Image (cartoon, rainbow, N blue to C red):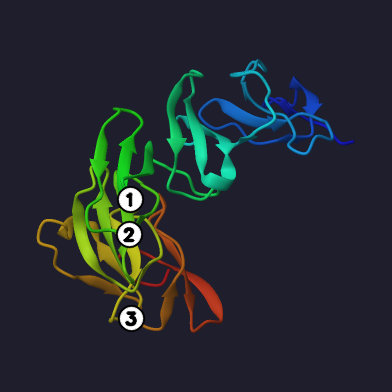
């Protein structure tokens, strides 16, 4: 059986090859699976020194995101315990999410009384998400949300920033822009118009949006369904 460990930047083995699976480190924590043939293999979170954050356990444990990791106690019913990078439980209960998208930005969507509630893991604050049926991942305090068939954006306190008016939201905001589909051609919407809520688009003509803008100031887009290229924040092909 192939086993995995970790090396440092010089190539020195710093954590022995003792795991059947091993993720990359995130927030100073990596998720590993111990060798074995159990139906649910024992998993653990390890620290950079190779020590366990918590003892290995026959449970599904996800990678750490924004300082928190999820241990699924009843994945069929979306029940989980969320731990901080110090190993302390920050929340235990039902999460309104599938296992592959739990939370980001320190926000977890919960269901209480048939309504969506946003739990801020960093502050402990709980905020109702009024008038929305679904909420996506948070980035920089903003997340796409859906009501019926239309999408808009909300902040981490559940406040509506952009009402439901888009056919789709393809990305979170990044560098002040988010990719959306509306009655206009696929476009990017400017974040600085939250106060006025005006629709001002960076139209992409025949191009289809693909990714959010990154720190490079460019976004990958697909033109005419055939090839990819990059645009800058003015919409110019680069």
Q: Position of residue 108 (x, y in %)?
A: 39, 40
Query: Badge 3 is on which residue?
Result: 185
Q: Give the secondary structure at mark 3.
A: loop
Q: CA distance from mark 2 to mark 3?
A: 25 Å
Depicted 54 relative to depicted 93: above or below: above
- Mark 2 Cα within 10 Å, few/some/many (few <14, many 20+)? some
Depicted 147 relative to depicted 136: above or below: below
Picture disc at residue 114: 1
Q: Position of residue 110 (x, y in %)?
A: 37, 43
Q: Residue at x 64, y 32 (%)?
A: 31
Q: Position of residue 89 (x, y in %)?
A: 46, 23
Q: Residue at x 32, y 52 (%)?
A: 143
Depicted 203 relative to depicted 116: above or below: below
The tally of labels here is: 3
Q: Quadrant of the C terminus?
A: bottom left
Query: Badge 2 is on which residue?
Result: 133
Q: Give the secondary structure at mark 1.
A: loop
Image quadrant where residue 104 sits: top left
Q: Give the secondary structure at mark 2.
A: loop
Q: Can the viewer see residue 66 in this picture? A: no
Q: Position of residue 22 (x, y in %)?
A: 70, 34
Choose mark 2 or mark 3, whichever is in front.
2
The numbered mark, 1 or 2, whose residue comes first in the sequence reads: 1
The numbered mark, 3 or 1, whose residue comes first in the sequence reads: 1
Choose mark 1 or mark 2, whichever is in front.
1
Q: Are marks 2 and 3 in contact (CB under 8 Å)?
A: no
Q: State left or right for residue 121 relative to residue 211.
A: left
């Amino acid at each position: 059986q192939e086993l995995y460990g970790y090396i440092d930047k010089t190539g020195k083995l710093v954590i022995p090859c003792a795991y059947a699976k091993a993720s990359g480190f995130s927030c100073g924590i990596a998720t590993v699976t111990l060798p074995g043939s159990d139906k649910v293999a024992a998993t653990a979170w390890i620290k950079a020194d190779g020590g366990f954050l918590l003892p290995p356990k026959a449970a599904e444990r996800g990678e750490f995101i924004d300082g928190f990791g999820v241990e699924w106690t009843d994945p069929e019913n979306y029940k989980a315990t969320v731990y901080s990078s110090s190993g302390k439980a920050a929340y235990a209960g039902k999460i309104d999410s599938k296992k592959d998208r739990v939370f980001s930005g320190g926000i977890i969507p919960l269901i209480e009384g048939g309504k969506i509630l946003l739990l801020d893991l960093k502050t402990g604050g709980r905020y109702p998400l009024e008038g929305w049926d679904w909420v996506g991942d948070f980035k920089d305090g903003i997340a796409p949300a859906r009501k019926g068939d239309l999408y808009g954006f909300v902040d981490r306190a559940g406040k509506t920033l952009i009402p439901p008016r888009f056919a789709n939201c393809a990305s979170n905001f990044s560098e002040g822009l988010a990719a959306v589909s509306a009655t206009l051609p696929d476009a990017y919407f400017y974040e600085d118009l939250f106060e006025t809520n005006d629709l001002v688009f960076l139209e992409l003509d025949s191009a289809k949006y693909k990714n959010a803008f990154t720190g490079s100031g460019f976004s990958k887009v697909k033109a005419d369904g055939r090839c990819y290229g990059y645009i800058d924040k003015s919409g110019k092909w680069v």
